[in-house]
Image: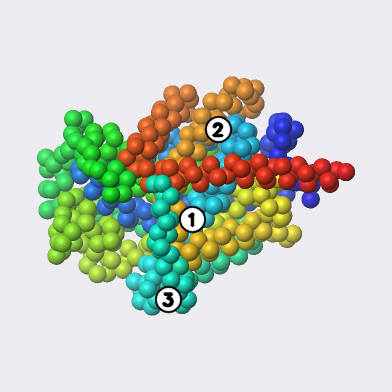
Amino acid sequence: MTTETKQPISATAVSDWETHRHQDPELVKALGLTSATMLVMGSMIGSGIFIVSAEIAREVNSPALLIGAWVVTGFLTIVGALSYGELAAMMPRAGGQYVYLREALGPLWGFLYGWTLFLVIQTGTIAAVGVAFGKFLGIFIPSVSSSNWVLHFGKVPPIGIGPMVLGNMDVGLNTQNLVAILVVVALSVINIFGVKTGALIQNIFTTAKVSALLGVALLGLFIGRNAQAVAANFHGNFWNNAGFGAQHAVQVGVGGPMLMVGTLTILAVAQVGSLFSADAWNNVTFTAGEVKNPSRNLPLSLALGTGVVIALYIACNFVYLSVLPLDGSPTGATIVERGIKYAAEDRVGTAVMTQMLGSAGGFLMAFAILLSSFGCANGLILSGARVYYAMAKDGLFFRNVAKLHPTYKTPAVSLMVQMVWTCILCVSGSYGQLLDYIIFAVLVFYILTIFGLFVLRRTRPTVDRPYRAIGYPVLPAIYIVMALFIDVVLLRYKPQYTWPGLMIVLLGIPVYYLWSRHSRQAAGSASA
């Protein structure tokens, strides 16, 4: 183990950034532009695009605002990616966003991001994607079900802590989360055998699911258009309830009062679903230490990957509006009568394909989501482990997590630690609640990282920047203002998504000081 691995992060370690910022010599440079771009797209595309439009439609009650919600998400995502490109080209190190926060704002902020990533963001998302895989596998194999228990410990009663309610979930092993665990274990083990192996799986499944999304878009635009839906959503009705003077009802929290808000506010509220569906585009930065020619390929992969996915997402929502009316009834007897708002279990994508192609369409969509979920889980597993590896090298995570596999040079211990915690979340059933709680915090970390771009321009103006953020300082500043507005709106109207996430982040502060003190003591003992 090198000296850098042993020493905890400190002022001295941070000051060495200029010397070592381009070095991760122990990692294998195996990811080219294609693999990096596939990692961006594969990590973004999960099951959200096929589901969350129903909830957004109920919130905005307007075809134009449904598209508008995805356009806002697309703008934020692409501007964020263009801004991160500068940071990635400056600091092509394993850990990505953790490193950017550490260098721009200090080690505490980097740790809080890594802490939240491990506790909830990455592992919770992997668990959710794995369970989604099991859920849709159940369409083909009925015995795979959340009600088919292998080992049932019972239901945990709800516990209220301010706006946060924990519990009220079944704990145990059913065939659905068993499938999720098997997927997580298999992909974690496979990724030990070299980053090329993980990238190959990523490339195959990302190609398949991008093709599936493109297929949905082409089918809907050229074959599956429904005259009833087109008339309801486009012929004079597209801009319904979309004016700046329009008023929209939103419920404050869970069981709170209904308030009337303006168009900009309801668009901010609707970002919960669309932003989460487009999230994880930053994961390629976690693997920066293994990207070939990172100063070129990281910014390019971020721009290309986010651009393609956002274009597909917006196209798919136009397809939804071309096949199903926005409005409908929860008791509708047919798919068209239920509309987008009340698609069965919010599965809009499945409803659209079934409407176009009959029952075969539903099975095709279920298969597409299986591919999407598997590829997404692989991308999240591959990239997340690199963050904990980087933290361990700084003395801010379990020391052994910094160890690489002696043959394949992959962060094998980090992959296994991530795997174990993810499996615990699967069995506990808590991943869904935790992800709800952390959406707000994810956006806060994006804001802080892009603010860090301004900080580094001021504090390190002479550092080589192979790529400079397009539109700086205007576009990054607009991003910060828009994201802050969304967070303020969520604080006001969706406290169940905000304060709990902040509590999880803040719990990391005492952990940081305990861990850093322990690391300093360990380093002092080693030097003595």
Report how far apart the C-alphas of labels 3 and 2 lie in the structure. 49 Å
Residue at numbered disc 1 = 124
Q: In the image, is residue 73 above or below residue 195?
A: above
Contact? badges 1 and 2 (CB < 8 Å): no
Report how far apart the C-alphas of labels 1 and 3 lie in the structure. 21 Å
* Number of the front mark, 3 or 2: 3
Q: Quadrant of residue 148?
A: bottom left
Q: Please name the amino acid that badge 3 sits on.
A: Trp
Mark positioned earlier in the residue sequence (1 or 2): 2
Residue at numbered disc 3 = 149
Mark positioned earlier in the residue sequence (3 or 2): 2
Foreground of the two, 67 or 499: 499
Foreground of the two, 161 or 238: 161
Q: Position of residue 147 (x, y in %)?
A: 37, 73
Foreground of the two, 231 or 293: 231
Q: Quadrant of residue 498?
A: top left
Residue at numbered disc 2 = 86
Q: Secondary structure at mark 1?
A: helix
Q: Position of residue 106 (x, y in %)?
A: 62, 33
